[in-house]
Image (spheres, rainbow, N blue to C red):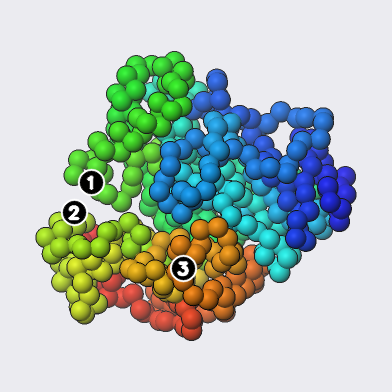
Amino acid sequence: MSTAGVAAPVVQTQYGPVLGREKNGVMMFNGIPYAAPPTGDLRFKAPQAPETWDDIRDGTRFGPAAPQLPSGGMTNSLPVKWDEDCLFLNICTPSADGARRPVLVWIHGGAYRSGQGAVPWYNGSSFALNGDIVVVSVNYRLGALGFTDLSRFGEEFATSGANGTLDQIHALRWIKKNIEYFGGDPDRVTIAGESAGGFSVCTLVANEHAQGLFQRAVSQSGSAEQVLSAELGNRVADLLLDELGAENADDMMNAPVMDILEAMNRVDKRYSPSGIGNGAVQAFYPVVGSEVIPVAPLEAIKRGVGNAVVLMAGVNKDENSLFIPRGVTEEKLAKQAERMGSLSLIEDYREILPGASPTDLAVQIASDQLFRMPTIRMMEARAENRSAGWMYEFDWESRQPHLKATHALEIPFVFNTLEATGVDAFIGPGEFPQSVADDMHSVWTAFIQGSDPSWSEYNMQTRTVMHFDNTSSVVENGDVARIAAWNKVR
């Protein structure tokens, strides 16, 4: 049952009734548990179904985020209330009237160690009001609590290296069974996410356990390559156990959460590009080798997993300007190129970007290693399998010095939330670039509603990419020189 169009709507889910609130023409139901609290005996375990409830549950407040330390990222200025009991989702709907509207499920980013679905940038009101779309945002376990492979301690920990991913799948199953009560269509679901959320989208597209839970997907600054091998996953677990002085499962189950978070930071310093890893995949990322992620997502995509999913994927022009400080020297640039496999990258990028400073070259090389080239390799694999896919690039440059079209900048354009808290610090002074937001928001809205983008699908002949800017344009074969440069180091 539901009561729509009133100030205090109540929706009956399969687990119990939830009280929402009406705000600015949409209904919001926040802090809904989609799984049992992953605490106590369930720490490091696969997600379980939530308990049912009889009394009306207050859904007017967001649930806690997953445990995390301040990230310094876009959400750092926002208060983050976290708790190990964190498996909640939030729903924004035009009306809980039983209609079957398209659904957007948003997976937040944050390097798999920070973030939450409650970030104002992710407010789904514009999608609901302008696109008649139901928007769901999801919290999932992060960092060591979501991605430490403790399978050495027994079968009950078999999924521990990818429990954060399993949380996302569990949330999608909850949505499949319950979204109709909120006016959504369980058979018209689009998943989308940015950064680690984009990595998650690609991992879910390539995941056998997630097939049928969604029909469309959008990867924003994502990759099907951001996973740890079983060997590196074990190494990360070794380092964490060492930092905590833990010798067995009981030690890990009983360790204080703050001790685990602080130990993660120490592990990060020991797990470095100069030691193990290659600088591209960080510690506490999903681990390959369990039933959750049996093979690397890109390999699964090459084998045809997820072929039926309609995909849109893209990158921002200057992703790593957010992470690379100004003043990169020629010496630092050379060291960066050596870590990535070849000094030839510098020579090639000087030809691609004549007159670029060492800092700008460093930004472009790192951006392409982490985001552009993995996205292209995924699109190539899907094109070989004749899977539907479109690629975009976000080119609008921030008015803040040196940021340009940086990482995460496209999010408020996609959600049409340019006035949200913290956005102005990214876009800089002056009038809001509303026309660019209108353009992108309309493309995402149409895609979620089931329409394909207006530009050509990505294929190996034309490599068509839509570039979003003050004046958007379609470009063919614009990345061929970069692809050739990276093919030399593969």
Could you classify mark 2 by the number of other residues whose Cα lies within 10 Å: few (under 14), some (14-19), or many (20 or more)? few
Residue 303: image x %, image y %? 44, 54
Amino acid of disc 2 = Arg
Q: Residue furthest left?
A: 331
Above/below status of 319 relative to 201: below
The residues tagged by marks 3 and 1 sit, at their Cα atoms, a distance apart of 31 Å
Question: Which residue is label 2 attached to?
Answer: 339
Which quadrant of the view contains residue 265?
top left
Q: Residue at x 37, y 63 (%)?
A: 319
Look at label 1 and name its amino acid.
Answer: Pro
- Residue position marked by numbered label 1 in the rendering: 273
238 up-or-down from 271: above or below: above
Q: Earlier in the sequence, mark 3 or mark 1?
A: 1
Image point (42%, 81%), residue name: 475
Q: Which one is nearer the viewer's eye here, 427 or 351?
A: 427
Q: Give yes or no for contact between labels 1 and 2 (Cβ–Cβ under 8 Å).
A: yes
At mark 2, the secondary structure is: helix
Q: Earlier in the sequence, mark 3 or mark 2?
A: 2
Residue 230 location (% of width, % of height): 34, 36
Given this view, does label 3 or label 2 mark the residue nearer the observer? Answer: 3
Query: Residue 474 at what x, y percent from top left?
Result: 46, 82
Q: Is residue 191 above or below residue 267?
A: below
Three-letter amino acid code at disc 3? Answer: Ile
**What residue did someone put label 3 on?**
427
- Real-space CA distance between mark 1 and mark 2, rounded to the nearest whole angstrom: 8 Å
Answer few, some or many: residues within 10 Å of disc 3's Cα (few below 14, many 20 plus, some between 14 and 19). many
Residue at 19 percent across and 57 percent down: it is: 336
Dividing the picture into quarters, in which one does residue 364 lie? bottom left
